[in-house]
Amino acid sequence: MEPAMGMGLVALMGAAATVAGCSEDLESDIGSQSNPNSQVQLAAQVGYPHRIFNKAISGEPPSNAMYCAVGAGVAMVLMSESVMSASPLIEIAIGAFVAALLNGVFSTTSYMGRNASQTRFNQYVYLDVLRNQVLSLMGHAYIATFCIVLLSYVLWEQTLIGHPFPFPVIALIWGLCVGAIGSSTGDVHYGAEREFQDFKFGSGLNAADSGNITRFAEAGIRSSMDNAWFCSKFGGPATGIAFGMVVFLDNWRSTAFGGWTAVVVGLVIVLALVIYNRKIETYARKKYGPYPEYAGEIAA
């Protein structure tokens, strides 16, 4: 493969990964499947019934791995000549659509089952929440799955990069990766800033305040769509950039260098990111502190 074409494919995968990361994070924020989901589940039991969608069937990595693997599996079946001979983009789109339907099924059953089990705590099943937000969840899941399956196809296709792993396995790995980055990067701008915005920045969460989520938005009672509005300002794009950098920088060093030189370049990139992350952390501590060692220090 010519270097120019190789770098073009790397750029394509990085762009697809950026869109996938952003969409995945917003999907998890709407569905409360991020790390703060335990607080949403607990809220009604400690006296805070709410209208926030909650579908925390599992963590983001395994659920997204399942969606991406299903999408790639369906696309791979359609790509066999015995099934249909359409464009790979059409087949990938169909696979992502099937994965989005699976997302809708899991979202519906988990929301209804979880809220129905909490009626004793005055937590109800709101049909308008179910009707309005499941489609939004499916839409974001479709975009994320389509982009992941697309970049996995570029890696797998023998005339392009030709990765030795099977198509669905590559998609499963990248699905795990985007879910993990959504949990680590995007959640900071959802749980710490949105669900508990009544608490002092950097104070942590006292165990006695577990489930004490903020239930009112800028225009009335909060729903998960308000969470998506908030997270689309920074949390979603930050997740997309983080995942896009992982895909682009990893494939860039392999394409541009190869061998042990690529390994050394990878170590240099990781070291540079660690130093940069440390500088950002110290800047935030000085500008937005205090960051107490534990939440009790603020009360004291």
Image (cartoon, grey):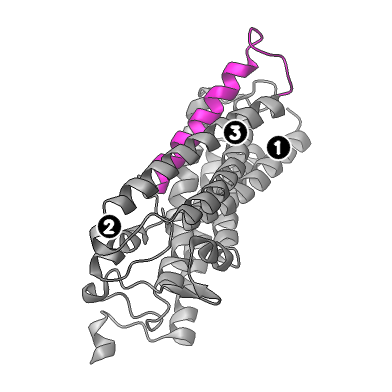
Residue type at mark 1 is: Leu
**Residue lying at 37% horizontally and 62% vertically, measured from the top left:** 36
Which SS type dominates the magenta stretch? helix
Determine whether the residue tagged by mark 3 lies in a helix, strand or loop: helix
Which class describes the residues within 10 Å of circle 1: few (<14), some (14-19), or many (20+)? many
- Residue 97 image label: 3
Q: Residues within 10 Å of mark 2 (few under 14, many from 20)?
A: some
Dot 2 or dot 3, earlier in sequence? 3
Q: Residue at point 32% right, 46% down?
A: 113
- Report the front residue among 127 and 299: 127
| C-alpha span from label 2 to label 3 | 33 Å
The spot of residue 112 in percent (x, y) is 37, 47
Residue 83: in magenta span: yes
CA gap, disc 2 to disc 1? 52 Å
Establish if 213 lies above or below 167: below
Specify start and end residues of the magenta stretch as a single range.
Answer: 60-87
Residue 200 location (% of width, % of height): 38, 84
Query: Left or right: 8 with respect to 154?
Result: right
Q: Position of residue 9 (x, y in %)?
A: 70, 37
Q: Earlier in the sequence, mark 3 or mark 1?
A: 1
Query: What label does residue 9 carry, if any?
Result: 1
- The quarter in which the N terminus is drawn is top right
